[in-house]
Image: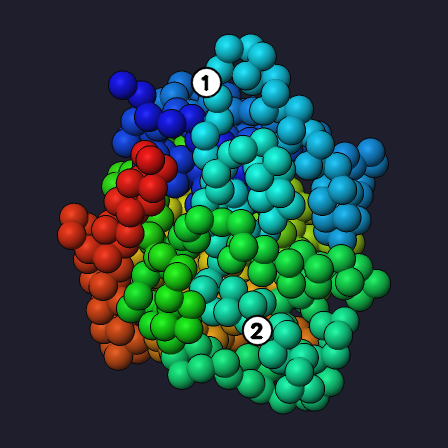
């Protein structure tokens, strides 16, 4: 007998779709009927990427559905505060109509909503429809702890009631949680300053989960976030998440993956390749882009670099980049997107130059890869501090007086990370801990069983 029909709803961004799609595969494996809901714009990207890889059959039974995000001008999706404002106003009604339409079409009644905490508006929709709610926190638990402590931080005078810092200092919520400077608060590093009130609302409303969600799970594990999980004991870690042990099942990528890079990696020596990827949002100006390219060349090491079509702001000389690629041909490979989990698990990868999004961070930890951290926005600065100050499994780049990470800085830090035996040992120990957690009898595995048991009621 089939188990309950579960509706899975991520916040519409790649770093949120991926962990919820990974969780969906596991729920499908345990007999649940799963409908995965993207916005229409992101649904089209996911389907297109799946078709480029051979079709949607690889989802093995996950139903894909979509609803409008209410954004009338496509350009506004590039302005995150405008997008979030339209999204939170328009999605509730559209979600209700989707549920009604599915039931009218003969699909089983939705019993559970598994929602991204950043889609907190959906909790009220579920309550109105008589649907029970469990939620997923897709970032670090430390980030959630900071969000939930916004009233306390405001009361202590660290923040004003609009979320802006009142003091220029580094603070730490509790032992084991990374220290964070007030200039790097997650909601103050997303888009233009005039959009900050909308983003601050998005982060601060995560307190809705305690009232309406029956269980909160997260993509983490106890050895990674001991202090944060002690502070929030009701948040259950089920990570590091993956779709399957071979990383073959699709995780809802917005761009087609270039699998040629796996064959290229096969031809490289063990522990030799510098892997460089900055996620789905990071964009560099042409000057920093060129300095990064020259720094990779200067390392003298083979490198695999993910350069999205929208990776640069402003005009980058195509002739210059073509000349660069011709110069490093054979030594470096540039792709527009790649199967990152398979790449990180490859024996040839020596280190990961990363923006430190939480998915990338957990994927690197699980694969036992040292980090060179280059955060860009939101909670990535907090994740960097985990790597450099708590786990000590990598280093961070430094910017010069002009705000540029120079090619010499990049080369120097790569050599330090790759050559540090103590970093490698700490990386190995953290990887071992992660693997134990997701194995049969491990803490994450047991927590996932608790989620399955709840959804089976």
Residue at 58% x, 60% y: name it: 207
Which image quarter is the C terminus in?
A: top left
**Label 1 SS:** loop
Residue 417's disc number: none
Label 2 and label 1: CA atoms lie apart by 39 Å
Does the rendering let one see residue 148? yes
Does the rendering let one see residue 55? no
Q: Residue furthest left?
A: 441
Vertical placement of residue 94 versus 337, above or below: above
Which image quarter is the N terminus in?
A: top left
Residue at 50% x, 69% y: name it: 145
Residue at 73% x, 85% y: name it: 166
Mark 1 burial class by Cα count in 10 Å: few <14, some 14-19, many 20+? few
Residue named by callout 1: 108
**Residue 455: x and y, percent?**
36, 37
**Residue 429: x and y, percent?**
22, 69
**Label 2 SS:** loop
Please indicate whether residue 239 sits to the left or right of residue 143 in the image.
left
**Residue 105: x and y, percent?**
55, 10
Of the numbered discs 2 and 1, the one sitting upstream in the chain is 1
Q: Residue furthest top?
A: 105
Residue named by callout 2: 149
Image-quadrant location for residue 294 = bottom right
In-front residue for pair 313/184: 184
Image-quadrant location for residue 189 = bottom right
Residue at 55% x, 85% y: name it: 171
Applied colour scheme: rainbow
């Amino acid at each position: 007998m089939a188990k309950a029909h579960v509706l899975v709803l991520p916040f519409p961004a790649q770093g949120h779709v991926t962990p919820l799609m990974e969780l969906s595969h596991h729920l499908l494996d345990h007999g649940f009927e799963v409908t995965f809901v993207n916005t229409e714009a992101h649904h089209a990207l996911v389907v297109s990427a799946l078709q480029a890889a051979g079709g949607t059959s690889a989802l093995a039974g996950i139903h894909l559905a979509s609803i409008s995000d209410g954004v009338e001008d496509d350009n506004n999706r590039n302005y995150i505060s405008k997008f979030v404002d339209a999204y939170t106003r328009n999605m509730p009604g559209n979600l209700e109509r989707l549920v009604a339409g599915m039931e009218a079409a003969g699909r089983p009644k939705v019993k559970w909503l598994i929602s991204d905490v950043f889609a907190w508006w959906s909790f009220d929709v579920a309550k109105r429809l008589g649907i029970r709610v469990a939620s997923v926190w897709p970032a670090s638990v430390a980030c959630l702890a900071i969000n939930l402590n916004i009233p306390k931080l405001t009361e202590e005078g660290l923040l004003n009631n609009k979320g802006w810092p009142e003091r220029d200092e580094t603070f730490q919520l509790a032992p084991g949680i990374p220290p964070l400077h007030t200039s790097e608060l997650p909601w103050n590093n997303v888009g233009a300053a005039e959009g900050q009130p909308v983003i601050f609302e998005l982060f601060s409303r995560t307190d809705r989960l305690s009232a309406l969600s029956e269980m909160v799970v997260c993509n983490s594990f106890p050895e990674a976030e001991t202090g944060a999980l002690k502070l929030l004991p009701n948040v259950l870690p089920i990570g590091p998440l993956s779709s399957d042990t071979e990383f073959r099942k699709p995780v809802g990528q917005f761009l087609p993956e270039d699998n040629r890079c796996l064959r290229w990696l096969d031809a490289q020596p063990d522990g030799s390749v510098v892997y460089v990827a900055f996620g789905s949002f990071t964009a560099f100006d042409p000057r920093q882009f060129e300095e990064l390219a020259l720094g990779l060349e200067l390392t003298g090491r083979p490198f695999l670099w993910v350069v999205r079509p929208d990776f640069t702001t402003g005009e980058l000389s195509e002739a210059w980049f073509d000349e660069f690629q011709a110069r490093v041909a054979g030594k470096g490979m540039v792709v527009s997107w790649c199967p990152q989990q398979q790449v990180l698990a490859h024996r040839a990868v020596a280190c990961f130059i990363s923006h430190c999004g939480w998915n990338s961070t957990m994927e690197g930890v699980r694969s036992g890869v040292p980090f060179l951290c280059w955060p860009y926005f939101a909670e990535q600065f907090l994740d960097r501090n985990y790597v450099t100050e708590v786990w000590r499994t990598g280093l961070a780049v430094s910017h010069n007086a002009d705000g540029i990470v120079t090619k010499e800085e990049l080369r120097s830090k790569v050599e330090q990370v790759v050559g540090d035996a103590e970093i490698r040992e700490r990386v190995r120990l953290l990887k071992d801990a992660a693997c134990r957690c997701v194995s049969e009898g491990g803490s994450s595995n047991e927590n996932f069983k608790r989620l399955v048991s709840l959804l089976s009621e």
